């Protein structure tokens, strides 16, 4: 039987995630022990070790889940503005997970992975009006747009999603589109 599909495994992982989220609200990941995590989740250590080796493994698994959800969004989208909007809406739809991943685990890694996928699906050459003067700066412009988008998203999450996802997506799209026309 596939362990990932077994309901008991899913339940165990869910309660371990919830316990980790609860503990991360109080302190940093490096300060959380396996014993404390297991006590909070009300599971024994052997159960924890059946699925993970350290608490960081739970966060990495969550990051992989977020990446997969963002990848699904990417595959459904036909243009960059849709990708940005749907990604922001996805992050806003699970605020607790987004806050943990982006404030405690430095979710810029997830965003960098998804932006690399975006780049493969929407090549820079198709997004930027390439003039002879612009060609040497294409890579720098892309990096600037990527890092700037990550900073805006992280700031938005750290400020408790105080602006609607649609507004954040619109701002990022505007900036990226302006950058593409330089």
Image (cartoon, rainbow, N blue to C red):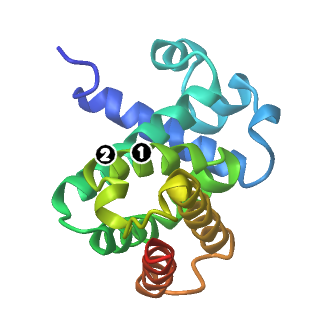
Q: Residue at x 82, y 34 (%)?
A: 31
* Number of other residues with Cα within 10 Å of mark 2, as a class: few under 14, some 14 to 19, many 20 or more: few
Q: Residue at x 24, y 51 (%)?
A: 72
In this picture, residue 14 sits left or right of residue 56: left
Q: Where does residue 167 sit, x and y in percent of width and height?
A: 46, 88
Q: In whole angstroms, how far apart are the C-alphas of marks 2 and 1? A: 6 Å
* Number of other residues with Cα within 10 Å of mark 1, as a class: few under 14, some 14 to 19, many 20 or more: some
**In the depicted structure, whether residue 55 falls above or below residue 62:** above
- Please tell me the numbered disc located at residue 116: 1
**In the depicted structure, whether residue 162 falls above or below residue 6:** below
Q: Where does residue 152 sit, x and y in percent of width and height?
A: 61, 71
User: Residue 163 or 112: which is nearer the viewer?
Assistant: 112
Q: Where does residue 165 sit, x and y in percent of width and height?
A: 44, 80
Q: Residue at x 46, y 13 (%)?
A: 50
- Please tell me the numbered disc located at residue 143: none
User: Hey, which quadrant is residue 30 in on the image?
Assistant: top right
Residue that lies at the very extreme toward the front in this rendered image: 132
**In the depicted structure, whether residue 116 falls above or below residue 12:** below
User: Hey, which quadrant is residue 162 in on the image?
Assistant: bottom right
Residue at disc 2, secondary structure = helix
User: Residue 122 or 35: which is nearer the viewer?
Assistant: 122
Q: Where does residue 48 sit, x and y in percent of width and height?
A: 53, 20
**In the depicted structure, whether residue 163 falls above or below residue 128:** below
Proximity of marks 2 and 1: CB atoms separated by less than 8 Å: yes
Q: Residue at x 37, y 70 (%)?
A: 129
Residue located beneath label 2 in the image: 120
In this picture, residue 123 sits left or right of residue 133: left
């Amino acid at each position: 039987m596939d362990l990932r599909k077994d309901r008991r495994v899913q339940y165990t992982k869910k309660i371990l995630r919830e316990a980790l989220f609860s503990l991360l609200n109080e302190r940093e990941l490096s300060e959380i022990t396996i014993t404390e995590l297991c006590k909070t989740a009300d599971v024994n250590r052997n159960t924890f070790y059946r699925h993970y080796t350290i608490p960081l493994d739970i966060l990495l698994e969550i990051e992989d889940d977020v990446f997969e959800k963002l990848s699904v969004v990417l595959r459904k989208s036909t243009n960059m503005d849709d990708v940005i909007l749907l990604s922001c809406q996805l992050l806003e739809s699970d605020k607790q997970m987004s806050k943990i991943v982006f404030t405690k685990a430095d979710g810029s890694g997830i965003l960098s992975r998804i932006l690399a996928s975006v780049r493969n699906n929407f090549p820079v050459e198709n997004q930027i009006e390439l003039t002879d003067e612009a060609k040497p700066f294409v890579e720098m412009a892309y990096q600037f747009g990527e890092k700037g988008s990550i900073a805006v998203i992280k700031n938005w999450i750290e400020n408790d999603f105080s602006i609607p996802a649609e507004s954040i997506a619109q701002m990022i799209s505007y900036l990226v589109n302006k950058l593409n026309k330089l």
